[in-house]
Amino acid sequence: MQELIALAVFAIFSLPYLKERLTLNHSLGFAFITLGAFSLFKVLLKT
């Protein structure tokens, strides 16, 4: 969960301050980390 929050804050910070555009690589990375966190929490909540 911490990784998701950190990525969201960085994405919001990087748009106006660093004037960086979010690319497909950023979106895919965020999606994979979200899937990993979801699967981890799903396993942890099952046991």
Image: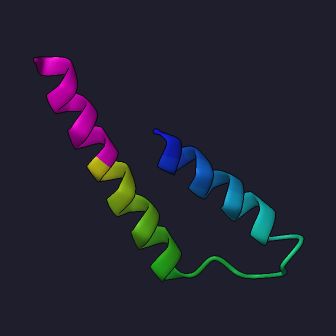
Q: Position of residue 21 (x, y in %)?
A: 70, 81
Q: What is the basis of the colouring in this image?
A: rainbow
Q: Position of residue 46 (x, y in %)?
A: 12, 19
| Relative to 10, 16 lies left or right | right
Relative to 42, is 5 above or below?
Answer: below
User: Residue at position x 63%, y 76% from top?
Assistant: 22
Quadrant assignment for the C terminus? top left
Relative to 3, is 24 above or below?
Answer: below
List the single residue furthest toward the left. Answer: 47
Q: Which residues are magenta?
A: 37-47
| Relative to 11, 4 lies left or right | left
User: Residue at position x 69%, y 61% from top?
Assistant: 10
| Relative to 1, 40 lies left or right | left
User: Residue at position x 20%, y 30% from top?
Assistant: 42
User: Residue at position x 38%, y 50% from top?
Assistant: 34
Q: Position of residue 7 (x, y in %)?
A: 58, 57
Prevailing secondary structure class for the magenta stretch in the rendered image: helix
Dividing the picture into quadrants, the one containing residue 17 is bottom right
Can residue 46 be found in the magenta stretch? Answer: yes
